[in-house]
Image: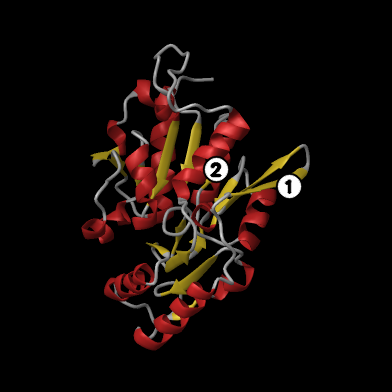
Amino acid sequence: MKPVSQMSAAEAAGVRYVLMDIDGTLTTGGKLTAEAFTALWRLHKAGLKVIPITGRPAGWCDMIAREWPVDGVVGENGAFVFWEENGILREEFHPNAVRNNHPVLQRIKDRALAEVPGVRIARDQFSRLFDLALDFAEEEPVLPLEAARRLEAIALREGAKAKISSIHVNVWMGDYDKLSMTERFLQKRFGWKDGETVSSAFAFPALTEALFVGDSPNDEPMFARFPLACAVANITRYGELLASLPAFVSQAECGEGFAEIVQALLNKRPAA
């Protein structure tokens, strides 16, 4: 990973979409700081498409799509996307999404609570539609990463999908992830086509139109896909769990790191 300060002016100029995780990327210690939220507004005012890509639940994403300066939000690790259009909240669910009353998820929940001391169901579970969120680090007691890996292993052995975030292990049925829903949304809403070359002064392939910022293993499909993927500095906590690393990394962690990446991006773009 290179320092984000090494992103070239040509690379920055080609960006049209800025995608980002929320927990541990925008937030610091569980809080959305003024610095990080201001960075979202700076991107919006610069005319870039701003799209959070998160493991957070449908209930949160409804609010985010309505109240944040964003052009859509992908939630529950790719189960759906919400966006506002002409003053109306729109939604699309991934065709492979399976509701979270599936018996396999109930079995995984029972095993997790019985086999991993200290784990609990995430407080936001009541507003989820498709996944089971197992909390190992959002609230006290914060459990070691090894506990998250045990939870992931239980889910995978039971035949579910599982991803470790900075706070939860998200578990779901159905073949999708953050990347697959993001690409569906970009194609449907904005006509994005990853196989084409963008008609611009720099003739970049469309993949380089998107800059993603993340912090943890559930962001790995995005890191692997986008050449301009970035991470905030706390990504180093999960190095052993990541086969694909992003191209760039900030010096600062969490929301401060996100603001640093936004500053670097905007500084290197041509003046409006």
Q: Residue furthest top?
A: 201
Q: Which mark is residue 51?
A: 2
Does residue 41 sit above or below 176 in this rendering? above
In-image side of 160 versus 56 (left or right): left
The residue where tag 1 is placed is 89
- Residue 90 position, x and y percent, is 71, 45
The structure residue drawn at horizontal position 58% and vertical position 27%, both measured from the top left corner, is 191
Label 1, residues with CA under 10 Å away: few <14, some 14-19, many ≥20? few
The structure residue drawn at horizontal position 41% and vertical position 51%, both measured from the top left corner, is 256
Residue nearer the viewer, 238 or 250: 238
Q: Amino acid at mark 2?
A: Ile
Q: Measure the C-alpha gap from mark 1 to mark 2.
A: 15 Å
Work out whether residue 117 can be spotted: no
Disc 1 element? strand
Q: Which mark is residue 61?
A: none
Q: Amino acid at mark 1?
A: Leu
What colour scheme governs how the chains and residues are painted in the rendered image of this protein?
secondary structure
Does residue 227 sit above or below 54 in this rendering? above
Image quadrant containing the N terminus? top left
Decide which of tag 1 and tag 2 comes sooner along the chain: 2
- Residue 193 position, x and y percent, is 49, 26
- Residue 28 position, x and y percent, is 44, 60
Residue nearer the viewer, 41 or 48: 48
Does residue 110 sit above or below 122 in this rendering? below
The structure residue drawn at horizontal position 30% and vertical position 54%, both measured from the top left corner, is 235
- Residue 101 position, x and y percent, is 59, 72
Work out whether residue 111 can be spotted: yes
Image quadrant containing the C terminus? top right
In-image side of 265 versus 31 (left or right): left
